[in-house]
Amino acid sequence: ERNPVPAQIDALVIGAGVAGLYQLHQLRGMGLKVHGVDTATDVGGTWYWNRYPGAKFDSEAYIYQYLFDEDLYKDWTWSERFPGQREIERWMHYVADRLDLRRDISFSTTITRATYDEDIGRWTVETDKGETIDARYLIGCTGMLSAPLEDRFPGQASFKGKIVHTARYPKEGLELEGKRVAVIGTGATGIQVIQTIAPEVEKLTVFVRTPQYVLPMKNPKYGPAEAAWYKDRFQELKSNIPRTFTGFEYDFKNKWADLSPEQRRAVLEDIHADGSLKLWLASFAEIFFDETVSEEVSEFVREKMRARLKDERLIDVLVPKPGDYGFGTHRVPLETQYLETYLRDNVEAVSVRDNPIAEIVPEGVKLQDGTVHEVDTIIMAVGFDAGSGALARIDIAGRDGVKLAEEWGKDIRTTLGLMKHGFPNLFMTGAPLAPSAALCNMTTCLQQQTEWITNCIRDLHQSGSDVIEPTQEGEDAWVRHHDETADATLIAKTNSWYTGSNVPGKPRRVLSYTGGVGTYRQKCDEMAASGYPAFAMSNASAQQQA
Ligand code: NA7
């Protein structure tokens, strides 16, 4: 049964994933009348939608959990270091049950339009069910990587077989056994799909455009000893994780210049053997800034990859080339026997770097040179309109009827990644110019962002106001700081969803704040402690009464 949406509330939370659930819980705890909506039929967000074969964490499960409630944390036990989607989804259900959240969420409900009324300082929000909600605050917990690029190729509708984007993989699954399957894309998603389905399918054809740096995952099962090991450290995790550079349990400790070549090699080998993202997020911070260090660490990873692939043609297709881009300037995927998958007889890697996919035809995938790869099923692991995509797909009109999609279509700007000038009382999480999936363990960042929003609304009310909006100057200052920080990194020079270059026409900007999770937190805290100098506050209710 779908919960009806209330007509008038204090806050509407869009999205029932990691951010939305906690946001709802906090605002409810504050005594606000708050309601959640989600297009999905249940909670989970990313972990509801991404049910493709092999979907799993690349963050250690015990650091992906919420840290705001010790019992909530300790009463859940993971089965392995990097669990899969089913288990993560069960965890999210556990959270929703424990906090009794579902009663305040309308599922199967999509927000189509939101219009700000300046006279009353409130949002009028419309759903696809024809309902209207009048809300003081609109909070987009819509996800950083939740707007899939579903219509990627001409001719998709003509395909005779099944064609799916990984983030819309059907709940009941797809029959892959005995099928000729194409996977397009070798990002974190494609890699998980490829290594998982290869043994099942008759033939797997992988279309590879940009080869990836990959790191082998070590995924031990967790028993009572491991559970005790992380649960006993709850307080330590709670105080350390939010202060690291990337919101993981580890941080950069080594300085490249302080070590000899042998010592550097030893550090890299040691960290590589950890089988986690540590080589990326806790080896040498210089990989993000210094071309020489970047190249040396990149070569270290390429060497590991070449040794596993052996075959020269596969190496050519699957291993990044010097000068392409550096290790860690794109999202680094963890993998399990991913490279070895290409050594199987039923798996073919097709490079589409110089001979791109031209269109989908009824029989399969057609390349620019006219070659058609005939397949029964196409799995598109082609990614997302990251950061701005999810909110921009809603028709949001702020002050003076200004449209968010149009603004972001010209230039993607926010203040602290939490609000946008021209859009009073619209808060967002996982949004552009805040730390996010690019360089942050998502739960760490989303907890901090939702907590900031909650505190902001509390401060606003305490100051006798009910409308808040970043000033133009405030926003300019954040964008400037963000850009200066981002432009000092090698990430700014690369092409991927990190810079928006995966979406044709999207204005280019490093989408994620690169100054570090701990630093960002400090800046957010200072903004609040100093009375929100980058924001203007007012009281619409009082003005209305006057
Ligand atoms: P990504 O990382 O954006 O990867 C998308 C992949 O699809 C990537 O290999 C792309 O190649 C490829 N792609 C996209 N369009 C095309 C076309 N037209 N032709 C060939 N190949 C194409 O998305 P993921 O879902 O893997 O990961 C997203 C995030 O989710 C991930 O970072 C995690 O944080 C979770 P390209 O590199 O553009 O050449």
Image (spheres, rainbow, N blue to C red):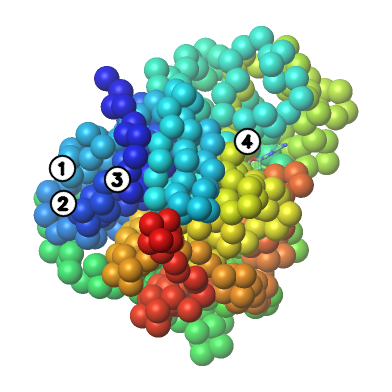
Amino acid type, callout 1? Arg
Q: Which mark is residue 98?
A: 1
Q: Nearer the viewer, residue 259 or 311?
A: 259
Amino acid type, callout 3? Val
Is residue 225 among the parts visible in the rendering?
no
Is residue 104 among the parts visible in the rendering?
yes
Q: Which mark is residue 149?
A: 4
Point out the frontmost of discs 2 and 3. 3
Local crowd size for mark 3, using a 10 Å CA cut-off: few (<14), some (14–19), many (≥20): many
Label 3 vs 1, first from the N-terminus = 3
Q: Is mark 4 in CB contact (under 8 Å) with mark 2? A: no
Quarter of the figure that contains the C terminus: bottom left
Which residue is at 81% across, 28% downward?
A: 358
User: Could you tell me which secondary element the residue under label 4 belongs to?
Assistant: loop
Point out the frontmost of discs 3 and 1. 3
Amino acid type, callout 2? Leu
Label 2 vs 1, first from the N-terminus = 2
Q: Nearer the viewer, residue 7 or 36?
A: 7
Between the C-alphas of marks 2 and 1, the distance is: 8 Å
Residue under label 2 = 72
Instruction: Establish whether ligand 1 lies closer than 8 Å to the Cβ of label 4.
Output: yes
Regarding ligand 1, which quadrant of the image does it lie in?
Answer: top right
Which residue is at 24% across, 67% downward?
A: 237
Point out the frontmost of discs 2 and 1. 1
